[in-house]
Image (cartoon, grey):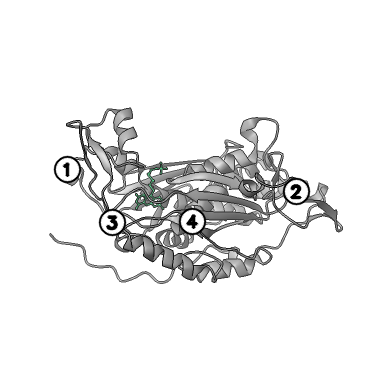
Amino acid sequence: MTGNRLRLLTAGDSHGSLLLGILDGMPAGVPFSAAAVDGYLWRRQGGVGRGARMKIERDRAEIVSGMWKGRTSGAPVGMTIENRSRIPQDRLPIRTVPRPGHADLTGMLKHGLDDANPAIERSSARETAMRVALGAVVHALLRELGIAVFGHVVSIGGIEASADRSDWEALVHARDRSSLYCADPSAEPAMLARIEEARERQETLGGVAEVVALGVPPGLGSYSQWDTRLEASLAGALLSIQSVKAAAIGDGAATAGEFGRGAQDEIFWDGGITRRTNRAGGIEGGISNGEPIVARAWFKPISTQRRPLRSVDLATGEETECRYIRSDTLVVPAGSVVAESMVALAVADALLAKLGGDHVDDTRAALDAYLARIPWERPALPTILTEPPMPPPAPVEAPAEET
Ligand SMILES: Cc1cc2nc3c(=O)[nH]c(=O)nc-3n(C[C@H](O)[C@H](O)[C@H](O)COP(=O)(O)O)c2cc1C
């Protein structure tokens, strides 16, 4: 990433006892509590299209280090999330037929596995629960510095939404009313019909999530080297998410096919620099330009298929069919929450690279001094984004299975 200041690490298997996570490089003094994680985890588990597992689990993170009396301490933030859907290793059926579109074959070849389970367990997107939990700490840091990051779904199975980007507050409220995390209510019926159609055909779907970062000051990232350009960090962060196969900044994908003049954002003066368009998605020359950062992630359709795909039994060399493993139909709404965390991480890393700070007050002082010398006015954040999302009350826990 741009700054190499923040480092997010996870460990743990999909059906192991728990997920482990470490966020290193956080400044001290950021107010935070485990409750501030719940709403993000709940949103990752929600959305139309998730499978049975999401009904089994209601994720809760436990903070085990890096906090002191309600604030980050400057030490690595450590967290755990228990898996409620646990399967002991010796009860997982041996899998010698790799599923196309998963890490089964690549993991088996790379690590010399004669059973795909270790690859399946670790490559699973269950791991993204921890990215979202640690991401909640990053969101808390950004909020302290006047920056908010949120995602919404802009396309499912080829059905496009057209969200109104002139009113972010209304957009986020509309997203929160949608079971698809889509801010365009007029697109939702067609999206839901498409999902139903996919289910009937025993098919899966993909789509596109957009993540917006508001309040990002100009000057994050650098054109000086290829690996310090902000869009490179953002795209890498988004492409690191399981099943994301393309990423774009602003209207990047669309403008490639257009004449150039209309693809620019002309610069105006209104007591400070202003723009009337943001086709560049808030980044020019590898550096944030003060406009909202807008990044998109394209999720491929889920690989796991109810109607079996052909593969090869690596134990015998015979061509055969894959066995179905419990799976979602669509991950884009949940994926949009993971994408929020990854964009927040890339932005925060670039911010800390520019401003430094071992305590958040130092970072804030450096930001204020910097903003005092540039003609950029910090935008007011939508009220809904000034607090972490809140989950509804937890359901009554089902008694543990006894057999
Ligand atoms: C939140 C989330 C949930 C996912 N759930 C599933 C799933 O239930 N079934 C599935 O086949 N793929 C699922 N995926 C995608 C796979 O994890 C991914 O396709 C697989 O690990 C191979 O990685 P790749 O697609 O990036 O090459 C999910 C992805 C995300 C982001």
Q: Would residue 375 be found to the left or right of residue 136 on screen? A: right
The label nearer to you, 1 versus 2, is: 2
Q: Which element carries disc 4, helix, strand or loop?
A: helix
Q: Which residue is mark 3?
A: 84
Image quadrant where one finds the N terminus: top right
Q: Which residue is mark 4?
A: 337
Residue 270 sits in quarter: bottom right
The label nearer to you, 1 versus 3, is: 1
Q: Which amino acid lies under the numbered mark 2 shown in the image of this protein?
A: Gln
Q: Which element carries disc 1, helix, strand or loop?
A: helix
Q: Sequence-wise, which precedes: disc 3 or disc 2?
A: 3
Q: Residue at x 27, y 55 (%)?
A: 85
Q: Position of residue 383 (x, y in %)?
A: 63, 68
Tell me how far mark 3 sits from mark 2, CA to CA. 50 Å
Q: Is residue 382 above or below residue 277?
A: below
Q: Which residue is mark 2?
A: 264
Tell me how far mark 4 sits from mark 2, CA to CA. 29 Å
The label nearer to you, 4 versus 2, is: 2
Q: Position of residue 173 (x, y in %)?
A: 57, 70
Q: Which residue is mark 1?
A: 90
Q: Would residue 100 be found to the left or right of residue 94 on screen? A: right
